[in-house]
Amino acid sequence: MITANELKINGIKSIEEQLKDQREVAIGIQGKVKYVVTTLEQYEQMRVAELEMAYQQVIEDVKTGRVTTSLDDHFIEIDKGTGNA
């Protein structure tokens, strides 16, 4: 973990040094992790994984019938707060 003070003193160099050996770097403020920094490449990989998971969930929803093609039904589900449609 990099402290906010270390970041203030050493700048981006302190992050770059830790990213040589780690995929992510935590930045702590007052002893607590407040931020996490990663490379753009790692960030893009995480985004692709998130999108793939969302896509798989949609496929599963379609297979199990947890979808609606009616706009009215969709708004009814939203009003109920179920979020299933």
Image (spheres, rainbow, N blue to C red):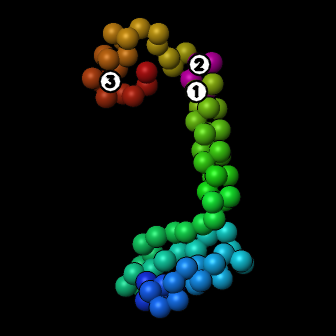
Mark number, residue 28: none
Mark 3–mark 1 Cα distance, whole angstroms, equals 17 Å
Find disc 2 in the rendering and name its residue: 62
* Residue furthest out toward the left: 79
Q: Is residue 18 above or below residue 61?
A: below
The answer to whether residue 43 is magenta is: no
Q: Secondary structure at mark 3?
A: helix
Residue in the picture at 63% in, 78% down: 16
Left/right placement of residue 81 relative to residue 67 reads: left
Q: Which residues are magenta?
A: 60-64
Find disc 3 in the rendering and name its residue: 78
Q: Mark 3 or mark 1: name the one nearer the start of the chain.
A: 1
The answer to whether residue 61 is magenta is: yes
Q: Residues within 10 Å of mark 3 (few under 14, many from 20)?
A: few
Mark 3–mark 2 Cα distance, whole angstroms, equals 18 Å
The answer to whether residue 33 is seen in the rendering is yes
Specify the quadrant of the image occupied by residue 63. Answer: top right
Q: As rendered, which of 80 and 51 lies closer to the eye?
A: 51
Answer yes or no: do the residues labelled 3 and 2 have beta carbons within 8 Å? Answer: no
Q: As rendered, which of 12 and 81 lies closer to the eye?
A: 12
Q: Given the image, on which type of amino acid does mark 2 rest? A: Val
Specify the quadrant of the image occupied by residue 58. Answer: top right
